[in-house]
Image (spheres, rainbow, N blue to C red):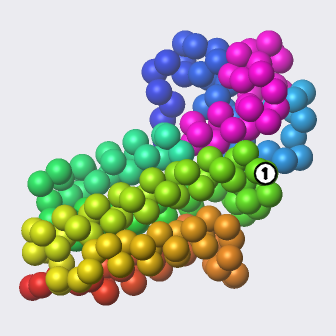
Amino acid sequence: MPTAPATARTDPVERARVRLVEVFLAEGFAHLGVGDLASRAECSRTTLYRIAGSKEQVVAEVVRSYFRQAAERIDDRIEETVGHQGAASDRLEAYLLGVAAELSRASERFARDLAADPVASQVYRANTDHAAARVAALLRDGVRDASMRPVDAEFVGAVVAQVMAAIQRGDIAGVAHAEAYRKLADLVVRGVGSRA
């Protein structure tokens, strides 16, 4: 399990947010009322409402926090495994596998709740859009640095964006989100392949 930021050890609001991220990932959130959220976060309702002013807003803020923390961990993973100067094809693979690793922390119930909750679903969609743009940029970099075959990076990026959106919506039946991203990484990396 990832370590909590230093501020989470001292700031009660941040500590509650970190705890709720873990609760949401493990058991979802739709079935939890405000009292349940405060209890699971080991905080008062007052502290909970310092995160946001309503249950719906708390859910959205906690989901945003999860994706923000996940993005930071993915960037750290890329830096540790490939480095900033590594080939774009290697960074692309590390990025998609990093997304899969982050999503593997989430329960199926969390995924269902994300899909069913309009505000949380919008947060997930915005994160998916950002991820798709990142993949498209890595594809363009890979064609430019010749670490990938000369493919139409815009087209491949658009296709990947569509698959990511389908994963986000839960349209790929029988495959968990994390596994779908692992399969997407394999497909894209093998498809654009190395020139070598």
Is residue 196 visible from the viewing direction of this image?
A: yes
Residue type at tag 1: Asp
Q: Position of residue 156 (x, y in %)?
A: 36, 78
Q: Which residue is mark 1?
A: 117
Q: Residue placed at 74% from the left, 32% from the top?
A: 57
Q: Is residue 93 left or right of residue 70?
A: left
Image coords of residue 183 (percent x, y): 47, 79
Q: What residue do we see at 28% from left, 61% from top?
A: 137
Residue at horizontal 62 percent and vertical 65 percent from the top:
168
Where does residue 7 sit, x and y in percent of width and height?
49, 18
Task: For residue 43, say whether it is visible.
Answer: no
Q: Is residue 39 magenta?
A: yes
The secondary structure that most of the magenta stretch takes on is: helix
Quarter of image, res 41: top right
**In this rendering, would 182 be left or right of 140?**
right
Q: Is 149 inside the magenta-drawn segment?
A: no
Mark 1, secondary structure of its residue: loop
Q: Which residues are magenta?
A: 38-66
In percent of width and height, residue 140 lies at 23, 67
Number of marks in the image?
Answer: 1
